[in-house]
Amino acid sequence: MESLKNILRGAVATSAVLCLVSLGVSAQSQSSTTGSADQQSTTTTKHAKKSSKSSSSSDMSGATSASSNGSSQLSAADKKFVMEAAQGGEAEVELGQLATQNAQSDDVKKFGQRMVDDHSKANDQLKQLAQQKGVAVPSEPAAKDKALKDKLSNLKGDQFDKMYMSHMVMDHKKDVAEFKKESTSAKDNDLKNWASQTLPTLQDHLKEAQQIASTEKGASATSGKSKAKKSSDTASMTPKQ
């Protein structure tokens, strides 16, 4: 009888152990499933946040691009001014270079070099500004200025000096008037500021050009009178036949 009791006790103990093991496995499986679900949920949330951030970034980029495109447009009048100023600036540089080579007067040579220096700087500023506004500016002078350069290229000395300085006076009068107008009436504020900053330099160019032109004109008149007097003296000294 005692042996039977021992057998029953062993069976009960074994059954209890098996139940405990089964419960442990079930709990571990449930924990693993829950962890997997939580991890999947976390991953899904991260992806959702990333997608939302990407969408927000895309929207912001689109807004920036739209803003940029909007600011790159100039009015017809402003664009016309930019194109003409760019061509005029290129002409001043090329004619100035020619003056340093063909001029007779040191003042004209120095003025020509100043045109190269000042207008090269202004041209670079205008190109940078135009690029920001989405406008492609010309890189060479207008046809009329090319024709003038060809004509001046065939002149030397005093003839070159007079014609070049006469053109500089007329050209800078026109430039000063146009830049003065743009400095007050431009629709684009950046362009208005550039015109305002460049205007004093052009006014100084005009003043200097008028002074040199006047000097050259006086020197030419004096030279003409001297030559006429010398010719007259020579004629009076020639014995009559």
Image: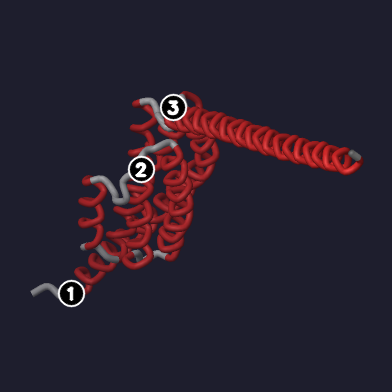
The answer, for residue 56, to whether it is visible in the render is yes
Tell me the SS state at disc 2: helix
Q: Residues within 10 Å of mark 2 (few under 14, many from 20)?
A: some
Three-letter residue code for mark 1: Thr
Q: Which residue is mark 3?
A: 70
Residue at the spot x=36%, y=32% of the render? Answer: 79
Rendered view: 112 above or below 57: below
Three-letter residue code for mark 2: Asp
**Image-quadrant location for residue 39:** top right
Q: Which residue is mark 2?
A: 171
**Image location (x, y in percent) of residue 74:** 40, 29
Tell me the SS state at disc 3: helix
Q: Is residue 22 left or right of residue 91?
A: right
Q: Gap in Å between the C-alphas at discs 3 and 2?
A: 34 Å
Q: Residues within 10 Å of mark 3 (few under 14, many from 20)?
A: few
Q: Which residue is mark 1?
A: 238
Q: Is residue 57 left or right of residue 212?
A: right
Q: N-terminal of the two: label 2 or label 1? A: 2
- Comparing labels 2 and 1, the label whose residue is closer to the camera: 2
Q: N-terminal of the two: label 3 or label 2? A: 3
Residue at the spot x=58%, y=32% of the render? Answer: 44
**Image location (x, y in percent) of residue 216:** 38, 56
Residue at the spot x=15%, y=75% of the render? Answer: 239
Image quarter (top left, top right, bottom left or bottom right) of the C terminus:
bottom left
